[in-house]
Amino acid sequence: MNCEQVMREEIVEKYLLGKLGDADLEAFERHYFSCDQCFDRLESLREAQDQLARDRLLVSARPRPAHWPWWTAAAAAAAAALLIVLLTMTVPTSERTELARAEPAATRPAPPAVARAPTTPPAAVPERGREPLTESGTRELRLAELARVGPAPYEPVVLRGPAGEARLAFRTAMEHYREGDYAAAAEGLRAALELDPEVAVAAFYLGVSELLAGDPETAILALRRVLASGAAGLEEEARFYLAHAHLARGDAESAETELEAVVRIGQARAEAAARTLAELRRLPPAEASQR
Amino acid sequence: MGAARLRGWLQWGPTEDPMPSAQSTPPEVSLVARIRDGDAAAESELVRAFELRIYTMAVMKTRDPEAARDLAQDALLAVLGALRAGELREPTKLAAFVWGTARNVINDHLRRSSRNTASPLPPELPGRDPSPHQVLEAEERTRLVQRALAALEAKDREILLLTLVDGRTPAEIAALLDLSPQVVRARKSRALKKLIASVRQLSRVSRSTPPEESGA
């Protein structure tokens, strides 16, 4: 078999569809082991086949109502890191004591009772025979899907010694957070920050709460504040949620920047960030328009 | 993997039909010689040159990406073992040799699978982790194909979907889309040409002039 035959007889297409006879199959496989050009054609069409099949699944999916049913399976180490930051930021040196965990607290808060709709509505499902979903519709739908994220884990600790006002306000707000009432949590966390603006972990959970309550713009402000504070142990989480806030606003470029940073940090969120990044890079370009 | 079993695969041997040589493959002769001399870098080079081809063939035959990854490793280990032992008599036929060995490994697996015989996991290959260049190439191809598909007219994309995913003939597509079969063939040909031309921006595909596509 040679390249001309491959082209003339649409061998690559037939190979991908399993329509070659045994002799042609063997001949083509031998051929592409030494022909970069035909192998490249095969890989390109195989990739196109995958993407077309995936896009069809995407546009065939029934539009789902907005909700946030997912829970991150974050390791206890991530929660512990957040707790350590909480103590170092909120407990004055004179009050700093050993940590003691509370009786097992849920790391999987109840689903939110109320969730605002995402900023981008899902696109309509096209019917067979009509024009398929536009590239911009597909992109918006995928960005909205990629934006979905579960709450950052939180496990309360029992501290000896009196708690300051800011810490009390924080603790109350986090009770709402654990119950899944993110709007109430956000309000309480804002109050805690007014009492003590230096509490980076409160700013972090404020950002997460605002995002889960459907306000990605405010979430971005809060999470950027966390990054600006340089709080140790919070950078990966803050960037991870910042990426999802950007996705919720449809800003893929900013999301990509944050996801790349999370991958570089290489800790608990790296794998999830890499997966989201790969999905993001498969989206049609923003400049594609309806034909 | 026993020596006797390996020799069984090597009995396939070179055929009377020599494979196209080196314009698009590494210089086989020096590569084989370096591997025989124990050059680890040469072994990594061979792995990178053939792993994706073997994987593609394996996944097309097994429809199982996980199994295909293991089979690619098995096949490459068999190839490297033979090359280290100097058992490839004609180095210019390296590509054919790799293909034949891989085919035998895959067919062996398919026969074993039908008898539900488990096989041990293969040891790690040299150069097994994809290089940053390979990762970038794979990502780049995905991106280029995505863009090329997005740049097609919706009807042309639908034709490609019906062709590549559903396996429909031009006549069937014509009936579905209310076009003539000739128009479907012409549009399909043009869409494929555009797709391949877009993806050929990859720098490594620059060695030979592609044959022109026939058809309107």
Image (cartoon, rainbow, N blue to C red):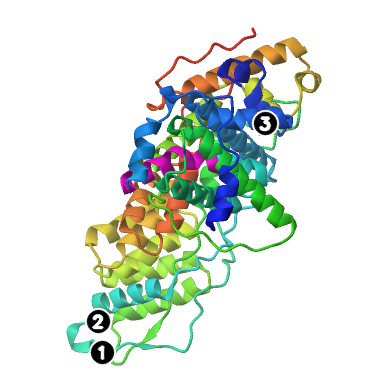
- Kind of residue at badge 3: Leu
Please name which of the two marks, 1 or 3, marks the residue nearer to the observer: 3
In this rendering, the answer to whether B103 lies above or below B28 is below
Res B48 → quadrant: top left
**Residue to which mark 2 is pinned:** A91
Find residue B80 and report its horizontal and vertical position in percent: 44, 47
Label 2 Cα crowd, 10 Å radius (few <14 / some 14-19 / many 20+): some
Numbered tag placed on residue A25 in the rendering: 3
Extreme residue in the bottom direction: A160
Quarter that holds the C terminus of chain A: top right
Q: Residue at x 29, y 61 (%)?
A: A226
- Kind of residue at badge 2: Val
Find residue A175 and report its horizontal and vertical position in percent: 46, 77
Find residue A176 and report its horizontal and vertical position in percent: 48, 73
Q: If you read the primary sequence from the N terminus, does the residue marked by circle 3 or circle 2 appear first?
A: 3
Query: Callout 3: helix, strand or loop?
Result: helix
Q: Give yes or no for contact between labels 3 and 2 (Cβ–Cβ under 8 Å).
A: no
Find residue B154 and report its horizontal and vertical position in percent: 63, 23
Q: If you read the primary sequence from the N terminus, does the residue marked by circle 2 or circle 1 appear first?
A: 2
Badge 1: chain ID:
A
Read off the magenta span: B38-55
Extreme residue in the left direction: A94
| Residue A44 makes an appearance in the image | no
